[in-house]
Amino acid sequence: MHRSVLTRLIIFLVASVAALIYLTPTLVKDPAKSLPSWWSSFLPSDRIHLGLDLQGGSHLVLEVKVDKAIENNVERARGELTNLLRERGISGVSVERQGTQIQLKAPAANVERVRGVLKGDFPNLAVVNTQPSDGTTDFFLTLSKEELKSLRDYAVDQSLETIRNRIDQFGVSEPIIQRQGQSDILIQLPGIQDPERAKEIIGKTALLEFKLVDDNANVEDAVKNGPPPGRQVLYGQGGKGEGGLGAEKVAYVLEARTLMTGEYITDARVRPSQQLEGPYVELILNSTGARLFEQVTAANVKRRMAIVLDNKVYSAPVIQERIGGGRASITGSFDIKEARDLSIILRAGALPAPVEIVEERTVGPSLGQDSINQGIISFIVGGALVVVFMIAYYKGAGLLANVAIIFNILYMMAVLAGFQAVLTLPGIAGIVLTIGMAVDANVLINERIREELRGGRALRSAIEAGYQNALPAILDSNVTTFLSGMILFQFGTGPIKGFAVTLCIGILTTVITAVYLTRIYYDYRLGARNLERISI
Amino acid sequence: MELIRPGTKIPFTSYRKIAVILSTIVNLAVLMMLFIKGPNLGVDFAGGTMVQLKFQQKVSIPDIRQALDKVNLGGSTIQDFGDAGANEFLIRLDKTSVELGALGAQIKKALAGEFGGDKFEVRRIESVGPKIGEDLRWRGTVSVIAATIMMGVYIWIRFGAAFGARFGLHFGLGAVIALIHDVLMTVGALLLADYEFDLTVIAALLTIIGFSVNDTVVICDRIRENLRKIKRETLESIVNTSINETLSRTILTTSTALMVLFALYLLGGAVIRPFAFSLLVGFVSGVYSTIFIASPVILLWDKGTRKR
């Protein structure tokens, strides 16, 4: 055997063995059990990852409403500013918030002192504009650029952490949670059974507040004509004791001031029902929270305290006595599942800003399995058609092209497994399509060899000229397809990316197998003996 | 076996006037359809929600509509999906789950009340917010245009380097015009067949662009080679010879690609069908456009006489 043939043969053998090793975990049924234990210690043990469209699951994109977090911060700054101005005895100043801006009206006499306070104590506020108007000066303030950026980043990162916590506690295997772009969070939940419930848990802001109920207020009047100053109307869910399940929403008139929020919660647990009430959720507060809770309850004995989650009143029990020990409970008419979900979101904490689901793609497990089956069937049928056609048309050379296809598929799958690329339904279509397009290279070569033979060339030089002359066209045509594959990869999301990936990998393996692998065979035949004809 | 006998000489270039006129008319018709009727945009691009349902028993669309009416979703578009007798349906809503709350839960509840909770299955939900839909629409359009231009530039540079910038430019322009033709033909077929335009259609269009330009590359490559070899003939005759010489390859390659696409179209399931359909149309159009559009464009500048 010619040396160069042998070398190339060895290279391809090594590559094929490596490919098989990479594919083994995918091909065996249960890799953890059926592969020997030494396998995973130094050989690849990852299977080809299936996309959500094949294994079922949810793909969610959440937009963090960063502006809301900014508004909250601006509101806080406004409060601090008002207090400080009062403390310093700077009078006649009005401080209002408009969206994410603060408008401050200062009488001419106090303008310089206001400036001093702003400069000295509020480095996080930037004055965007000042307008003198008769006797007063208007300051327009926003958060400074750096403050805004860090706030944005914090809101998104903190939301991401909180959501990750919630999902971990909810129990999803191998979730993907990552930031996408400026203020979006991408979440992938493979194999999830109850996407609606997961969405409920993920999407809740979970801002827990304790507020006092104003029992003296006229609820009907407040609902109709708006709440009196310093009060707000919030609704409960109409629990068992309050008008039956899912019935009329119950309105509460609450003092707008928040006594305490859920930030002090260290743990939340579901407790079984007492008497005939449903299960309840017990909150455990940290020491600061416990102290605060004790103070608050001591000061308001015999009054009703509403427990408000995301502006919905869960319950409003009467405070019987001062509550020490840092334990509080939320009762309501929920079943054990709802109680568990509530405990998860309370434990994981509130989101710094509300989130909104802006994209959802959920595929049920049965559809995924159907897609896999249909993909495999079209792969087999399409492949068989091409294989039969190639043998019918080119006989021996067609068979050779078919061998190249088989190695092509082997390498493609191995690369998918090796690079941990995700196989999707369009990705399977990409593999099927690759079979159909891969033979193009062999067709180009074979047509060329036939042509050269017709032109009267000797066999050896016809084969050589065939490969040589076909190569530019093969490379050009594959480069163009590869380029559009790259554009598609840039553009696509999820499943489409999977198609782009298989398309591009397929092009690389096609050039290798269809051109270089088949050539080994011809060189071997040509070197072995005086070859007179080939089947083409 | 041989499909095309060696030495075949079909005078393709002499049909170029008819071909160009015909294709221009068809393409203009597609453009008119596109602007008058407008594409049937899927949720990817239009925003909104699509729910795929599978029932165990035979269910009619009015039955489903009646059930959905109870949660005020009776106005949704409901259509059959998948193979006949599969009892699968698509429900299409303009709103997203954000605006409608737990949409899946609502639909489940409404249908469970009517048909029983274990008699159906929500197989797929796709919900896209209007902002993302608009973004995808824009990016999809840009990527198709960018790919088309990129192919032209590639061919321009590739053949320009080997053969002089002028020919490179002609080849490149020929390819771009052929690609625009293929994209429009595919879009037209999708409009006629009333398929929805979604992300997979963009994937198909980009693949068509990549594949269709292959034929152009192979023929241009042959033209380049023949221009060196044959000195005494007109450019038109050389172009014609080149098309004929590569004809058998063009047909074979497209045939094998069409074989696997037919398999995908018929057996790959309803989700992938529009994708396979687009590729089928685009690949056939690609062969036609290479032979009848791209090659004549090269001739436009030379009018049959060759000056080099």
Image (cartoon, rainbow, N blue to C red):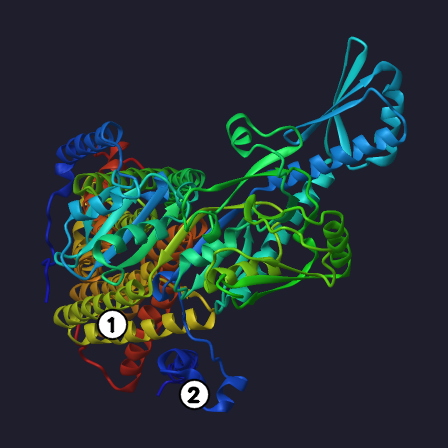
Residue B60: image x %, image y %? Answer: 14, 50
* Rendered image quadrant of residue A27: bottom left
Residue B110: image x %, image y %? Answer: 28, 50
Q: CA distance from mark 2 to mark 1?
A: 37 Å
**Numbered badge on residue B145:** none
Q: Toward the viewer: B224 or B255?
A: B255
Given the image, what chain letter belongs to the residue carrying mark 2? A
Q: Which residue is mark 2?
A: A33
Q: Toward the viewer: B69 or A158?
A: B69
Q: Which residue is mark 1?
A: A401
The three-letter code of the residue at mark 1 reads: Ala
Quick one: quadrant of the N terminus of chain A? Answer: bottom left
How crowded is the residue under tag 1: few (<14 C-alpha within 10 Å), some, or many (20+)? many
Q: Is residue A66 above or below residue A119?
A: below
Q: Is residue A194 above or below residue A405?
A: above
- Label 2 residue SS: helix
Q: Toward the viewer: A112 or A418?
A: A112
Side of A110 where A260 appears, left or right: left
